[in-house]
Amino acid sequence: MAYTSPFNFTFCKFFGCWCIFALTYLFFLAGVPAVLDWTDNGFSLCFGVNHLGPFLLTNLLLERLKSCPPSRIVNITSNVHKYQKLDFADLNYNIVPLFTYFRSKLANVYFTQELARQMERHGVTACAVHPGYVGGDWTSQFSILFRIVMYVITALFFISCEAAAQTVIYCAISDDVLQHNGGYFSDCKPCKLRPYVQDAGIAKKLWEASEAMVGLNSSAREHLASRTR
């Protein structure tokens, strides 16, 4: 997940100086489920894909986004973010995969808030979206009994992909979103968050910790900027 990885550099280089099109929308739909697995860099796969990946790519593209106002960043999170709190002593915690998933979704919300705070003067709007509970093939790793139970729950309570896309689309095109920069949305409207989820100090601390985890320090930023002009 180094900032010089081939995908990150090629993508950022393309939008940095070769692309004639504006980069006005950035959507992060990553949702690796609760799995006990790790990335090649030693990160929890769930936390790495759900939070660190979007965090890194967003930072690598910020200059381009700022140069194409108004631009928007939509982070897909989940309502389950409220069931955990971050442990800065071990952000890479993966002993209980389900808790890791909850924390990764909480990290999405904090990341969105701090991103909005930093970008508010640059015409960049960020929002976090709970699209609803959507069925998928994420249960394939579990027992047959668990899959049967989830099949029934999915049929009764989960929504279609088309329905789940509505709030994402709303956050991409609605002017109302501009009044709630950094907000958390569900059912096409801003929602209240629990007090600890609105803690700007925690959001800033997570941002700094994430920078350290992906190796995105000031010298790295300067190096990248010089190569993507």
Image (cartoon, rainbow, N blue to C red):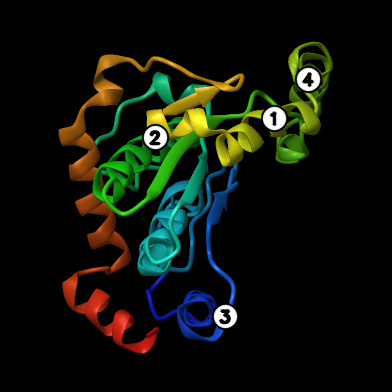
Q: Mark 3 highlights which residue?
A: 19
Label placed on residue 166: 1
- Specify few, some or many for label 3: CA neighbours under 10 Å numbering under 14, 14-19, or 20 or more: few
Q: In the rendering, at what x and y percent does residue 83 appear?
A: 41, 19
Callouts 1 and 4 close, C-beta under 8 Å: no
Residue drawn at x 51%, y 76% is 15
Q: Amino acid at mark 4?
A: Thr
User: Gap in Å between the C-alphas at discs 1 and 4?
Assistant: 19 Å
The amino acid pointed to by label 2 is Val
Q: CA distance from mark 2 to mark 3?
A: 30 Å
Amino acid at dot 3:
Cys
SS type, badge 1:
helix
Q: Which residue is mark 4?
A: 154
Q: Tell us which disc is closer to us: 3 or 1.
A: 3
Q: Earlier in the sequence, mark 1 or mark 4?
A: 4
User: Residue 105: x percent and y percent?
Assistant: 45, 35
Which residue type does callout 1 highlight? Answer: Gln
Q: Nearer the viewer, mark 1 or mark 4?
A: 1
Instruction: Describe the element under mark 4 as helix, strand or loop.
Output: helix
Of badges 2 and 3, the one in the foreground is 3
| Residue depicted at x 40% and y 20% | 82
Residue assigned mark 2: 109
Q: Nearer the viewer, residue 100 or 115?
A: 115
Does label 2 or label 1 sit earlier along the sequence? 2
Whether residues under marks 4 and 2 lie with C-beta atoms below 8 angstroms apart, the answer is no
Q: In this rendering, would 4 be left or right of 141?
A: left
Closer to the camera: disc 4 or disc 3?
A: 3
Which residue reaches farthest top?
156
Q: Give the CA separation, mark 3 to mark 1.
A: 29 Å
